[in-house]
């Protein structure tokens, strides 16, 4: 049965890419020669593990971490060393990763960047080089971009990807994983603001080189997707990119308490608390249309991307404890456990038609 949902986006302010430490421990900072531009917290074996990581990407939508997704992430470290990079907070992940989840790893270290100058610290670069897993905490994605882009940190992260480390992040740490990034350089933007004016100064989307996840080379991500509702702003990000760069990008969005874990073969599994009504969304333009471009993307004018209510094809997957519901990101067609939807927007009103058909394109 096809079901259409209409709703008008109303303003609701929330800082983008924010998350709290949910698992605090009583550790003290790892002693280093009086650093002032970073703080290190360490637990485990200080002898570097000589193992090969198993690769993969884990994208978490924010709020409380999903334990099963985190176990997936830690298992991909293959008993090696886990590194958490962040620009705020403290050691909330150390005990959680090292002891609470029952997955054996050699060590867990959190490094908090206190300012941009830490991006040149040899100790941190060495830790990235020796890690088997890198996790980006929540916070402010613009800090990550401002601190790390075009620095040795970016270089070392991308070198780590080439040697098949597992990588991931929550909230702001998820927001930086795609080739296309909502940078939040001017702060967060609501769906109502972005739909009313796709050229609002806060709609800051760019594709300057940063983290080189090859499976996400044509993808933008969005987080906290249901708190507040961010469907409208994601559509504005995609429409604006199509207009400015003449390219149709795809999107992966995760609601809170939901995680998308992508294995090296491109299969994305969605984890989540089955007691919560939370989903992940895989969004693409409707390739069946002869002209799938937005009808109107102009400064100071509401976005129109309707195409007879069929502008975008979306696969919606509910998170489960086993991650059995999947989509193949090599083709965005082979799917299991979710439903297809059609999304469109007109006059700041997003329309969703549920239980539609998969895109039938070459």
Image (cartoon, rainbow, N blue to C red):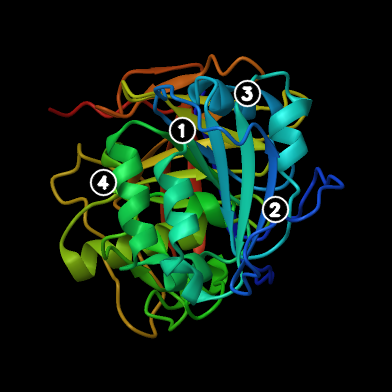
Question: At numbered mark 4, what does the secondary structure look like: helix, strand or loop?
Answer: loop
Q: Position of residue 142 (x, y in %)?
A: 49, 70
The outermost residue toward the right is 26
Q: Residues within 10 Å of mark 4 (few under 14, many from 20)?
A: some
Q: Position of residue 279 (x, y in %)?
A: 59, 35
In primary-sequence order, the first of circles 3 and 1 is 3
The location of residue 276, given as percent across then percent down, is 75, 31
- Disc number lying in front (4 or 2): 2
Decide: few, some or many residues near mark 1? Use Cα within 10 Å; few <14, some 14-19, many ≥20: many
Q: Is residue 230 visible?
A: no
| Label located before the other in sequence (3 or 2) | 2
Q: Which residue is mark 1?
A: 132
Marks 4 and 2, how far apart at CA = 36 Å
Label 3 SS: helix
User: Mark 3 = which residue?
Assistant: 71
Tell how many labels: 4
> What element does badge 2 sit on?
loop
> Dividing the picture into quarters, in which one does residue 183 lie?
bottom left
Residue at the spot x=61%, y=72% of the render?
A: 114
Which is more foreground, mark 3 or mark 2?
2
User: Which residue is identified by label 2?
Assistant: 30
Q: Quadrant of the C terminus?
A: top left
Which comes before the other along the chain, label 1 or label 4?
A: 1
Observer-nearest of 250 and 194: 250
Judged left or right of residue 244, residue 181 is right
């Amino acid at each position: 049965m096809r079901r259409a949902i209409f709703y008008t986006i109303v303003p609701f302010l929330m800082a983008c890419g924010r998350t709290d430490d949910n698992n605090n421990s009583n550790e003290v900072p790892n002693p280093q020669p009086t650093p002032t531009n970073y703080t290190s917290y360490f637990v485990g074996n200080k002898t570097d593990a000589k193992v090969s990581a198993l690769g993969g990407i884990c994208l978490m939508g924010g709020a409380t971490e999903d334990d099963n997704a985190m176990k997936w992430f830690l298992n991909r470290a293959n008993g090696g060393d886990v590194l958490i990079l962040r620009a705020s907070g403290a050691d909330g992940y150390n005990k959680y990763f090292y002891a609470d989840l029952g997955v054996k790893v050699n060590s867990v270290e959190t490094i908090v960047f206190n300012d941009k100058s830490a991006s040149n610290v040899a100790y941190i670069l060495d830790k990235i080089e020796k890690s088997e897993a890198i996790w980006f905490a929540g916070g402010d994605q613009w800090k990550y971009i401002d601190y790390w882009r075009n620095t040795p940190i970016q270089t070392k992260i991308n070198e780590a990807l080439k040697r098949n480390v597992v990588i991931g992040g929550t909230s702001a740490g998820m927001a930086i994983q795609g080739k296309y990034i909502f940078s939040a350089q001017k702060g967060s933007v609501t769906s109502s603001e972005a739909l009313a004016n796709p050229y609002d100064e806060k709609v800051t989307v760019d594709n300057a080189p940063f983290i080189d996840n090859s499976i996400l080379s044509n993808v933008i991500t969005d987080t906290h997707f249901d708190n507040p509702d961010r469907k409208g702003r994601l559509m504005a990000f995609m429409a604006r990119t199509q207009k400015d760069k003449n390219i149709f990008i795809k999107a992966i969005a995760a609601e809170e308490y939901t995680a998308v874990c992508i294995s090296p073969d491109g299969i994305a599994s969605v984890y989540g608390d089955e007691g919560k009504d939370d989903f992940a969304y895989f969004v693409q333009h409707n390739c069946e249309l002869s002209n799938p471009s937005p009808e109107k993307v102009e400064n100071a004018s509401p976005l129109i991307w309707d195409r007879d209510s069929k502008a975008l094809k979306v696969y919606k997957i509910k998170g489960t404890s086993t991650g059995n519901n999947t989509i193949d990101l090599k083709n965005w067609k082979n799917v299991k456990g979710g439903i297809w939807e059609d999304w469109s927007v007109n006059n700041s009103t997003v329309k969703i038609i549920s239980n539609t058909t998969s895109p039938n394109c070459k």
